[in-house]
Image (cartoon, grey):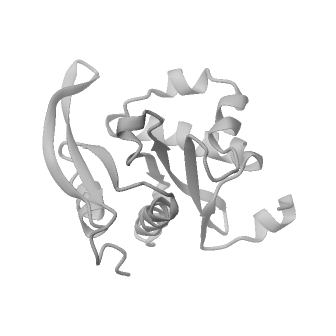
Amino acid sequence: MSDSEQRTEVNVVRRLVPADAMAYRARMLDAYERHPSAFTSTVAERGALPLRFWEERLAPGEDTADVVYGAFDAGGLVGAAGLSFEWRERARHKATLFGMSVAESARQAGFGRRLVLALLEHARQRPGLRLVQLTVTEGNDAAQRLYERCGFQPFGVEPLAIALDGQLLGKVHMWCDLLQPGHLQG
């Protein structure tokens, strides 16, 4: 896809490719900066990584370790979320949703839901995959409700999961069974 085609995408959710790496990096660094309690990674840790890290995360192909989808409005990339696939034989039936971010300017436009549903659909197409799991910081009720509307169920809380500014925050663990009907309702 050419740069001019990417610039004209509006209200689109699609899989990101290596050419999107700079925009993806900027989106995520902004998210780490504005919402540090939502992420385990810090802006300093991820900002120090070379562009190659971001490009590799967006590698094309059907059997990659990660896939990332992006949401675009007239201003460009406004949201992103990814799936990381287990490589170990006994855990290959699982994937982890990571890095969910929607820019402040694009919130309440349905991008978050569309990103999650696109990832779940992608997961359903991957042979042998049975469930997607994620964590959400305890107290982030809006994010937890979004995930629940998309078919995720909480199964426990990891206490003291992340340290942020002298506080220890818990993470709610959630999962979605890809074989359960009704999880892709509009």
Q: Is residue 156 above or below residue 80?
A: above
Nearest to the observer: residue 38 or residue 151: 151
Q: Residue at x 43, y 28 (%)?
A: 41
Q: Residue at x 71, y 42 (%)?
A: 22
Nearest to the observer: residue 165 or residue 123: 123
Quadrant of the snapshot with the C terminus: bottom left
Nearest to the observer: residue 89 or residue 131: 89
Q: Is residue 3 above or below residue 43?
A: below
Residue 175 pos. (x, y %): 26, 53
Nearest to the observer: residue 129 or residue 34: 129
Q: Is residue 103 above or below residue 11?
A: above
Quadrant of the snapshot with the N terminus: bottom right
Residue farthest along the front direction in this orientation:
89
Q: Is residue 31 above or below residue 36?
A: below
Q: Residue at x 68, y 36 (%)?
A: 56
Say left or right for 43 vs 6: left
Residue 77 pos. (x, y %): 63, 57
Residue 2 pos. (x, y %): 86, 61
Residue 130 pos. (x, y %): 35, 56
How many numbered circles are shown?
Answer: 0
Image quadrant in which you'd find residue 148:
bottom left
Say left or right for 5 vs 173: right
Image quadrant in which you'd find residue 15:
bottom right
Q: Residue at x 20, y 23 (%)?
A: 167
